[in-house]
Each structure stands twice: as structure tokens, then as C-alpha cells.
Amino acid sequence: MALENLKKIEDVMKAINQFSISKEDFEKSFESIVNLVLRREEHFTKVLNNFEQLVNNITQKLQSEQKKGIDDLKKQVDVIMKKEHKQRMDEIFKKMATIKDGIDGRDGKDADEETIVKNVLDKIPKPELPILEGEDRPDIGSIKGLRSIIEELKIIRGRKLGGGGFSKIAMDGHIIDGESLSGTKNGTNKIFTILNAPNPVASLHIYRGGARQEENPSGTTDGDYSISGKTITFNSAPASPEILKADYRH
């Protein structure tokens, strides 16, 4: 194998001598070729770096434009949704107000509430309750709200004028129906007042947009409002169009 390699080297040297190329010329030519290759490599590296930078710039620009487009779309949708929500709420409050004020009704007339209630009650099936005696009879405390109603009736009955007489005029003077609550309705304020402190407190009925509200059970916020004296604090702040009314005794 060594002899074969040596022979190959001799053949190469003979070829070089045949074309009259000196060793120095060969080295110079080889060096020129190497330099040319290096320059080409450097050029291609530079081209590739520029191309990579161009791709990165285009990608960043597309991402930025896409994000801006999505943000703009979200803003437009948000504006449309808020506008639509406000229009719907205004329509609902307006409709509720017309119903409460007796503007809407069949053939343009006010509804006969007593007749409606009677018709509804007549359609409700009346269960047959067994007559309970002795220990089987329910206690007054087992019926929710019954004790408060009885106490309220006792207080009303006990109110008298001088000389021991009972006056309906005096009684009516302590019965408040449909009083508007005082306070700012802006969707933020929750505190409102009435002219008198209810007595008993259980006689207070608060209406919000025509819907009866429930007082918070003691120590909780599971209802709709709380009361202290003449001050009523709602769990959620009423909005501007809402109608707030109160019925109570004092």
C-alpha cells in the first residue's frame, strides 16, 4: 500500500513537471482558490443573515398589526354591547314605569287588579287540610311572618285618641303608601331614606321597579336591603331610571 501511494505522488510530480508548474506557482494558485472560496462563503453568510433579519422584521410587523386589529375589534364589540345593553335596559325601565303608572292596559284602560287577583286565586287548587287538635296544632312561630303580622295588628289596634276612642283618620295618618325614597340613583349610591322610621319595622315594604324587595335576614346579606331607623341601604346600587317606593306604618 505504501509503494502504491508513493507511486501516485511520483505521478503527480511528473504531471506538474510536464506542465512546467513550479511548486511556488502551485501554492499561489491554491491559495487564490482558497481565498475565493472564503470570500464566497462570507458573502453567502452575509446574504443569509440579511434574509433572516428581513423575515424577523416581517414576522414582528405582522404580529403587531394582528394584535392591533384584535384590540380594535374588541373595543368596537365592547362599545356595541354597552350601547345595546343600555338601550335594552332603558326600554325595560320605561315599560315598567308605564305599567306601574297605569298607562299600559288592554284597550288603553287600567287593569282591574282586584279582579285579576280573584281570578288567579280561583284557579289555584285549594288543598284539603286536616283539622288538627291538641299537640298536633302548629305553633304561631312555625308560620313564617305570622308573628310580625299579629304584632303589627296589635299596635294598630292599640292606637287611640283622647277619651279612649279609635279614629280611622288617626290610623290613616300613620299609614304611608307609595312614598318615594330620597337619595341619588346613579348606579353607585346604595343609601336612601324615608320620612319616618317604620313602626313596626316589619310593616316596611320596599318596591324597586315595582318588584317587592326582601329585607336582609339578621347578620346576612341574603336579601335585597337593610334598614336602620329611616335609612335604607340596598345591597346593589339602584340605577337612574329605577323607581323606588315604600309602604310602611309609623
Image (cartoon, grey):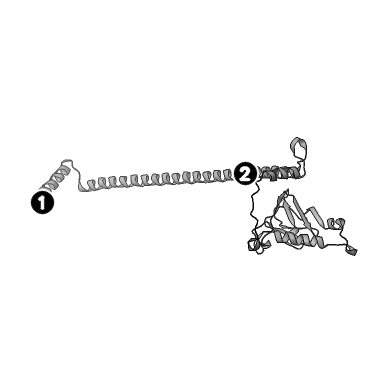
Callout 1: SS: helix
Q: Position of residue 35 (x, y in %)?
A: 31, 47
Task: Give x and y (percent) for residue 145.
Answer: 69, 59
Left or right: where does residue 16 sit relative to residue 52? left
248 or 135, which is in the foreground? 135
SS at mark 2 in the image: helix
Badges 1 and 2: C-beta atoms under 8 Å apart? no
Callout 2 amino acid: Met
Q: Please indicate whether residue 84 sits to the left or right of residue 153 in the image.
A: left
Residue found at x 15% / y 45% = 12
Q: Answer with the quarter of the image where residue 215 lies.
A: bottom right
Which residue corresponds to the image point at 10% horizontal and 51% vertical from the top-left?
2
Point out the tag, 1 or 2, that comes first from the N-terminus.
Answer: 1
Residue identifier under label 2: 81
> Is residue 60 or residue 37 the one in the foreground?
60
Mark 2: few/some/many CA within 10 Å (<14, 14-19, 20+): few
Q: Is residue 198 visible?
A: no
Q: Position of residue 48 (x, y in %)?
A: 39, 45
From the image, tell me which residue sits under label 1.
2
